[in-house]
Image: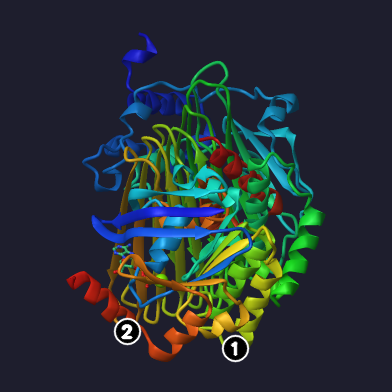
Amino acid sequence: MLSINGLRASIDGKEILKGINLEIKPGEVHAIMGPNGSGKSTLASVLAGREEYEVTGGSVTFGGKDLLELAAEERAAEGIFLAFQYPVEIPGVTTINFLKTAVNEIRKYNGEEPLDAARFLKMVREKAKLVSMNDSLLKRALNEGFSGGEKKRNEIFQMAVLEPKLAILDETDSGLDIDALRIVAEGVNSLRSPERSAIVVTHYQRLLDYIVPDFVHVLYKGRIVKSGGKELAFELEEKGYDWIKAEVEAQEVN
Amino acid sequence: MSTETIDLRTKLITDFHARESVMNGEAKSAFHQKKRAAIVQFEELGFPTPQNEEWKYSNVRDLVSASYNFNTSDTLSAEDLIDLKMPEQAANILYFVNGHYNPALSTVVSSTEQIIIDSLQNAYKNNPDLVNSYFDELVKNDTDAFTSLNTAFAHDGVFIYVPNNQTVEHPVILRFVSDARVENVGSQPRNIIAVGKNAHVKIAEAFRTIGDERSFTNVVTEINVGEEAGVEYYKVQNESENAYHIGTTQVRMLNKSHFYAATVTLNGKFTRNNLNIVIDGEHCEAYMYGLYFPDGAQHVDNHTVADHRKPNSESNELYKGILRDRSKGVFNGKIFVRPDAQKTNAFQSCKNIVLSTDATMYTKPQLEIFADDVKCSHGTTTGQIDEEALFYMRSRGISKSEAMSLLMFAFCADVVSQIKIDSIREYLENVIAEKLSRK
Ligand SMILES: Nc1ncnc2c1ncn2[C@@H]1O[C@H](COP(=O)(O)OP(=O)(O)O)[C@@H](O)[C@H]1O
Ligand SMILES: [Mg+2]
């Protein structure tokens, strides 16, 4: 489904991703962990098509297409979704109106008729219930004045509406209490299917209790320096990152 | 002598004296004496040049270098208006064609107990003392040539009088249509609005054009806001690519009154709006909203004044602009807080999105504060569209152009949502959406 080979990316001339290799098959959930500043959000942004980052090497294919050739909105229409670490506030545009535009633009891209208002509303109400999102939030300006938790929940709600093939969650768990965390995880799990995949970027093992990953990767200094099964997350929880940093530094010396 | 060889200033002065010479007793009236004083002032001032600080960025050379027919008779029928797609609304709707009141096109639905609505001409005929007591009482003819010119030629326009304690249910919509189908036309409507104590009314001025020749509108509106009164005043300009518009709205507020203004400029070649509010009472609230959206080589200049003369009042101002292509925008916002006006709150903000490197926005907030116990703030921003917001929207599948439209529509909504006459607000939303879809 997603195949990343030797991906390098920089911003303002500074190289952040230094050769990422990652293979994600349909139905798989991959967790990406790693210390702050490793490049996790950068990887997520580059996959979603943020233009500020310059891709300086490597390739990414998604569903057989050259992802790097596509504009951000085309990637979304192809089925990529990024739940932002810091969702943006957009004054004057209601969540509901925003989502309706998004749904219909994606349908247009895929050669489908726009959803009529009644069907759209029905679908949106169901999804809102799924993530216990209050209807009143839908009528408010997108993320404006939302609490941190409400913003994160809104990301998962949007994901549920758009039903992406590949969801990328960038620290959606940080700043959430345990109840909110469970709701977010349920939202993600409800989308799990043999065709859908996810990349879950997180600092904490606790999210992975709810969203059980097939693979865990450690990103450090712009490279994936370790990969394993879900037990790797427990190991990291227990021992922190210092042993990994030490391993990397030892290799750099050699 | 061909008209081209005479400059507009000389021609207008000659016109004035020609009209005066055929007047009889009327020339001696107090009304006419005000006009005569004004033409002298106009003659002294002449049309402004960019050396005049108030006209630094707005050059009227092009405007005054043509001639205009100011004396067209009524030329429009109801069918001619169809293409303008005027919004429908249960309201008092008055049409002025090239500045002249057109009773056949107009409808007044409110009762005369609630509100007197008449053309300035008729009102003066029927009630000369009442009209004269308001005419030319608020404006300054000695500093602004266009205002003095309007005063000198004041002949038609609207006269609105709301007696004390009346709340007028139906809005008053004044539609000024320039018919520039066959020649360059000029109009100088003069509007007088007097709102009594504890009276409430909504009034809109809409400016439109038919035809491709030049139109030159020089409008002056005087608004007297009585004690405890509430006035909502909207000025909407959607004129042609060849429309020149100079307008002054002069307002005086008395104790405990509220005044809301929204000035929206969607189209026109050259537009200058002066909105001057004298807050001559305590516990008043004045609101000034503005929106301008020029493209091509259009020019929009908004000059505003909030003049606080008494203590304990508040003024709030928000002007927003989107500039495309080679367009130019000017915002000059003056706040005066006179020595007596302690405990004044005055806020001003001007926000602009400049979408092209060839477009220019000039902003100049001017605060002159002579009292010490006041709260004042002002801020101007001029920038591009928010890239973070744009990426967020695109990452959800919304195309760049659609995302820009949504963001800009939202940007405009802060001002448009202030307009409380439904048909006008909806009309503006439609025109803005249409403008946004035209790339
Ligand atoms: N817009 C930017 N401009 C300059 N440096 C950036 C920018 N975004 C991220 N970086 C840098 O890239 C590195 C990786 O950041 P990020 O991808 O946010 O890491 P993580 O998400 O793993 O914490 C950091 O050193 C950060 O300072
Ligand atoms: Mg991050």
Query: What label sits on residue A243 in the rendered view?
Result: 2
- Quadrant where the C terminus of chain A lies? bottom left
Q: Residue furthest front?
A: A254
Callout in the foreground (1, 2): 2
Q: Which residue is mark 1?
A: A178
Q: Are marks 1 and 2 on the same chain?
A: yes
Q: Nearer the viewer, residue A89 or B4?
A: A89
Name which quarter of the figure residue B233 lies in: bottom right
- Cα separation, mark 1 vs mark 2, equals 29 Å
Residue B135 is situated, as x and y percent measured from the top left of the image, at 51, 50
Q: Nearer the viewer, residue B400 or B72?
A: B400
Can residue B214 be seen from the camera position used here?
yes
Residue A247 is situated, as x and y percent measured from the top left of the image, at 28, 78
Q: Residue at x 54, y 41 (%)?
A: B436
Q: Residue at x 67, y 65 (%)?
A: A160
Reply above or below: B298 against A60: above
Residue B281 is situated, as x and y percent measured from the top left of the image, at 48, 73
**Which amino acid type is shown beneath numbered disc 1?**
Ile
